[in-house]
Amino acid sequence: MDHAWIPLLLSLKVAGWATAIDVVLGVAVAFGLSRWRSSARELVDSLLTLPLVMPPTVLGYYLLVLLGRRGVIGAWLDKFDIQLVFTWQGAVIASAVVAFPLVLKSARTAFETVDPQFERAARTLGIDETAVFFRVTLPLAARGILAGALLAFARALGEFGATLMIAGNLPGRTQTLSVAVYAAVQAGDDSTANVLVIVTSVTCVVILLAAGRLLPQRSMASAR
């Protein structure tokens, strides 16, 4: 079963890190967009949402151009002996880029539905803006952010195109579940492909069941 568990564990690690990055960046950007009053806001939002509709292989190519040794970022990182291409860290970046719009959209909607009267009431009590965000705005928007995070995790777990482009298919190092399924099918190894598909399906069902249980609990906690 190592041929199934190793890609699964790697996929969970990659998806976990990618989701953590997306939550931090997505919440910050979503809050900024929800409070920004400018005609350029929707244009910026559209540009940040592009990974949701753009072909993953195209995203992978862009990442290669940026992060490869001859790329703008990759050449700079190479000076410090840091290489992201064909590493699990590169897979994290690819998954984070692809899943980012799911957190952004959910978090922005959540922030925009927060009643501003609660924030104004907190300010009248002498609470500074940072405390208002962490004690009032963020808790009220937490349910939407959690929903986006779960969707982003599921999307990152199944990412294939961009991951294959930038991280490759190195068993035990960059071979995630989706890439392992592709490799098994290409090699004509139906038994391995079947096991990997079952593991992937069961994992996705578990994530969806967890989402179904967590969201109502979060909603009840917020209501209290």
Image (spheres, grey):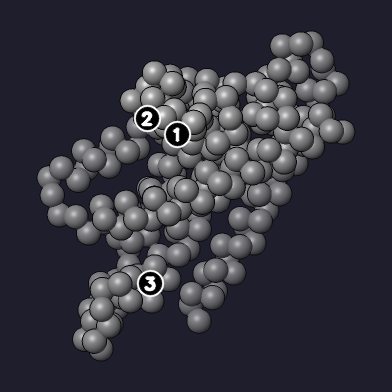
Q: Callout 1 environment at 10 Å: few (<14), some (14 to 19), or many (20+)? A: few
Q: Do the residues labelled 1 and 2 touch (CB within 8 Å)?
A: no
Q: In this view, does 22 lie above or below 3?
A: below
Return the disc, 1 or 3, that comes first in the chain's sequence. 1
CA distance separating discs 1 and 3: 36 Å
Q: In this view, does 81 lie to the left or right of 122?
A: right
Q: Name the residue under label 1.
A: 80
Q: Element type at marker 1?
A: loop
Task: Say whether marks 1 and 3 touch (CB < 8 Å).
Answer: no
Residue 68: % across, % down: 44, 22
> Whole-percent x and y of residue 213?
64, 61
Q: What residue type is labelled 2?
A: Trp
Numbered disc in front, either 1 or 3: 1
**Looking at the picture, does residue 187 appear above or below residue 192?**
above
Label 2 vs 3, first from the N-terminus = 2
Which numbered disc covers residue 76? 2
Residue that numbered label 3 is attached to = 134
Q: What residue type is labelled 3?
A: Phe
Rendered residue at 38%/76% (across/down): 135
Residue 128: name its quadrant.
Answer: bottom left
Query: Mark 1 is on which residue type?
Result: Phe
Residue found at x 77% / y 29%: 196
Image quarter of residue 172: top right
| Residue 55 in picture, x, y percent from top left | 44, 22
Disc 2 versus disc 3: nearer the observer: 2
